[in-house]
Amino acid sequence: MSNTQQLRRRIKSISNTRQITKAMELVAASKMRKAQNQVLASRPYSNVIEYVLGTVGSGVDRTKHPLLRTGHRGPTQKIAFILIAPDKGLAGSLVTNIMRETLQFINQNNTHELNVITIERKARDFILKTGNTIIADFASLQSPPTLRDTNPIARLVIDGYTKKTFDQVYIGYTHFINTVSQKPIIKKILPIENTKPDQDESARNDSVEFRFEPSPDDILESLLPRYIEVEIYQAVAEAAASEHSARMVAMKNASDNAKDIIYDLQLTYNTTRQGAITQELAEVTAGANAV
């Protein structure tokens, strides 16, 4: 592009775009810090409630508790699937990765009756394209989320499972690892299968005899629904931290790339302008010599 006027327009256009991506980067960074702090703060609670569940539930009769009982095991099962995805784009490959994982899950369970609960717009739009049934849609959750936001989702799947509307419940979300790394995950949350204490914790406490008041069965009646609530809340919090981190990184990369392009264009502009000035001087000199 040798025309200096075109180069100036191009530089101005990219500079304006860079201002937008830089502003989006700063907004995403602010949201990212809040979401990361929340998800890291809630993980110990999630781990503890899982350990307590394993300790209390390791010796109970699973058939006494609806959330521990295994559902129908026929060739066709009724599966509820909670899908958590971003509400907006511009988050790098995050949306693509969770959708690819979801599509694989759908294909693996195409012989079963799949009912989907979507969280945020990208999840709803994707499931509509696949033609699967959406039984509930939760949009525009608070960011960072609270238990008040996610408890209706937990209540929906708990009621559906205890009433045998669902035989299994899965949840798909993006697990937050660090600012530049997130991993799509699909895990089963009902029936609750992990009622054995962690081996490391168990070995640490193998000499301790636990006595429960009230009975383990009574404790589980209150603990099991709370465990599902925490599982869903933690998944939504992980997804929020992943989304804002991915968006911040994507916008930073866009801003850095724009800066590099502006530098190259400015260099081309200066070279072109210098050549034009040199040519004009040569023409003036040639004209003067001709006179």
Image (cartoon, rainbow, N blue to C red):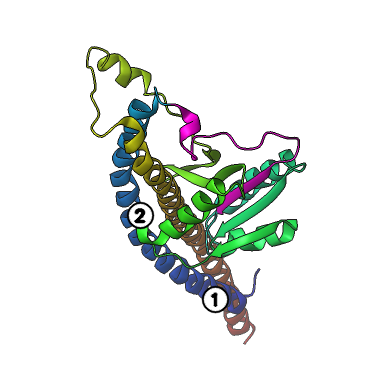
> Which quadrant: the C terminus?
bottom right
Residue occupying image coordinates x 62% and y 60%: 135
Residue tagged by mark 1?
Answer: 8
Q: Of helix, strand and loop, which one carries label 1?
A: helix
Q: Given this view, does label 2 or label 1 mark the residue nearer the observer?
A: 2
Q: Nearer the viewer, residue 164 or 142?
A: 164
Viewer-side residue, 240 vs 68? 68
Q: Amino acid at mark 1?
A: Arg
Which secondary structure class fits the magenta region best?
A: loop
The residue located at (43%, 55%) in the rendering is 240
Q: Mark 1: few, some, or many residues within 10 Å (few <14, many ≥20)?
A: few
Q: Position of residue 191 (x, y in %)?
A: 53, 37
- Asked if the residue under mark 1 is in contact with the one under mark 2, i.e. CB atoms within 8 Å, the reply is no
Q: Is residue 82 magenta?
A: yes
The residue wearing badge 2 is 35
Which quadrant holds residue 51? top left
Q: Residues within 10 Å of mark 2 (few under 14, many from 20)?
A: many
Residue in view at x 76 percent, y 43 percent = 110
Is residue 41 located in the magenta-colored stretch of the structure? no
Q: Position of residue 258 (x, y in %)?
A: 51, 62
Coordinates of residue 281 in the picture (x, y in percent) = 55, 77
On screen, residue 197 versus residue 64, left or right, reads: left
